[in-house]
Image (cartoon, rainbow, N blue to C red):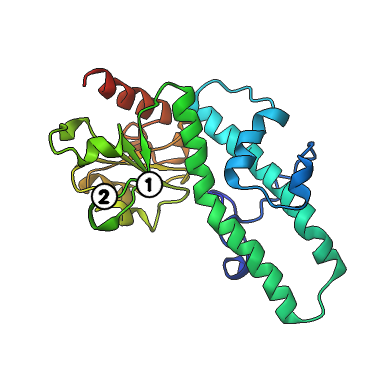
Amino acid sequence: MIPGKWLLGRGDRLFAGFAYRPDAEPSSVRVPLGWVDVFPSGEEIIAYLPEVFRFLKTTPDDLIIERRDSEYKLFRQIEELHILHQVRKGFDSVDEFMQVANSVSNRRKSRSGKSLEIHLEHLFQQFGLEAFSTQCKTEGNKRPDFIFPSCTAYHDQGFPEEKLRMLAVKTTCKDRWRQILNEANRIENIHLFTLQEGVSPQQFTEMTTEKVTLVVPEPLHKKYPPEVRDKLLSLNGFIEETRGLGRNI
């Protein structure tokens, strides 16, 4: 689901994970012929975006929003290419409808959060933050989204803990932020990237008490209560701060 958008009805049962956005029509760009027969992966879609979209933004905070919006429009175009003819043809039974609906729902859920991680990987590399590991296996088989500077450094007991960073990624964090608290025991101060458009002051206090720093694209800061905004970290701020740690190793 995209933060800040209203959705009526029980869409959570059928189309959870990447809810319909009436303000984002499917794109109508040229797509590779192979995508007509095989639904592309999230990595393939994101890698293809510069081929058909012109990105005008210049900062990580603006680009993450611009690129994700473009990806969503392209995803909808590809989804309609694969699914719309089935919907227009109709269904012979409820079971047939549910099979298609569940397939769409599962694809949306599996790619929503993962696509955000892929966008961040690309932006980290573009803006010079190249030392990181994804899905590093830590204590108890936990797998945080990003470990900086590397998984090897995390498991090296001689590597200073103050030089380690963990970044969790959640499209929305309002009810799920506590899941990240024990994903990397060596890292006391946790960073959480989210597109959540605001949390209450009380919930923000709970997060800071647990030593969680919210990383939020700068254009979304205005969605947060005034007393919270100056305590948010922008994506650009996180990149610069973490990149700076590497210079001092």
Quarter of the rendering containing residue 72: top right
Any mark on residue 138, and which? Answer: 2
| Amino acid type assigned to the residue bearing label 2 in the image | Thr
Task: State the image coordinates of residue 27 (x, y, percent, origin top left).
Answer: 76, 41
For badge 1, the amino acid type reads: Gln
Tell me the crowding category of disc 1: few under 14, some 14 to 19, or many 20 or more residues within 10 angstroms, Cα based.
Answer: few
Tell me the crowding category of disc 2: few under 14, some 14 to 19, or many 20 or more residues within 10 angstroms, Cα based: some
Label 1 to label 2: alpha-carbon separation: 9 Å
Determine which of the numbered discs, if any, sits on residue 135 in the image: 1
Tag 2, which secondary structure?
loop
Query: Left or right: where does residue 196 sit relative to residue 39?
Result: left
* Vertical placement of residue 66 versus 57, above or below: below
Name the residue located 33 percent from the left edge and 45 percent from the top edge: 136
Residue 47: x and y in percent read: 61, 35
Determine the secondary structure under disc 1.
loop
Residue 15, compared with residue 240, is above or below; it is below
* Residue 114 x, y percent position in the rendering: 50, 48
Look at the picture and state if 188 lies above or below 142.
above
Q: Residue at x 61, y 63 (%)?
A: 105
Which of these two is toward me, 167 or 160? 160
Question: Which residue is at the far top?
Answer: 247
- Which image quadrant is residue 163 in? top left
